[in-house]
């Protein structure tokens, strides 16, 4: 996942959440990769990731907290 773009990370998270088939291990891996790339996310990719975590009930996870903290600071992009 080190070569994935922000969209490459957001799309599968969104897809699994949309299908109501969240995979906790996949979401964790995607989130860890996303944390290293938060500055590369455009608003749509960022929103897709946050929505996927919320839909998958991963609200307590550190990656979700990092995403929301980033949004609060408006330093994602």
Image (cartoon, helix red, strand yellow):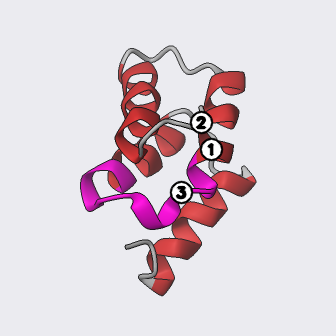
Give the distance between the C-alpha atoms of the residues marked 1 and 2, in whole angstroms: 5 Å
Residue depicted at 45% across the width and 20% down the height: 16
Disc 3, disc 1: CB below 8 Å?
Answer: yes
Q: Nearer the viewer, residue 65 or 8?
A: 8
Give the distance between the C-alpha atoms of the residues marked 3 and 2, in whole angstroms: 11 Å
In the image, taking residue 2 as reference, residue 3 lies left or right, namely: left
Residue under label 1 = 33
Q: Which mark is residue 37?
A: 3
In the image, taking residue 12 as reference, residue 67 lies left or right, namely: right
The stretch in magenta equals 34-46
Q: Give residue 8's position: percent from left, percent from top.
A: 40, 33
Q: Give residue 1's position: percent from left, percent from top.
A: 59, 31
* Crowding near the residue tagged with mark 3, few <14, some 14–19, many ≥20 C-alpha atoms within 10 Å: some
Instruction: Report helix, strand or loop for mark 3.
Output: loop
Q: Which mark is residue 24?
A: none
* Crowding near the residue tagged with mark 1, few <14, some 14–19, many ≥20 C-alpha atoms within 10 Å: some
Q: Which mark is residue 30?
A: 2
Residue 29 lies, with reference to residue 49, above or below; the image says above
Disc 1, disc 2: CB below 8 Å?
Answer: yes
């Amino acid at each position: 996942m080190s070569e994935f773009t922000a969209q490459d990370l957001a799309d599968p998270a969104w897809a699994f959440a949309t299908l109501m088939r969240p995979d906790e291990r996949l979401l964790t891996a995607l989130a860890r990769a996303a944390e290293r790339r938060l500055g590369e996310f455009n608003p749509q990719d960022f929103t897709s990731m946050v929505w996927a975590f919320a839909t998958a009930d991963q609200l307590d996870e550190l990656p979700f907290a990092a995403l929301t903290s980033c949004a609060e600071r408006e330093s994602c992009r």
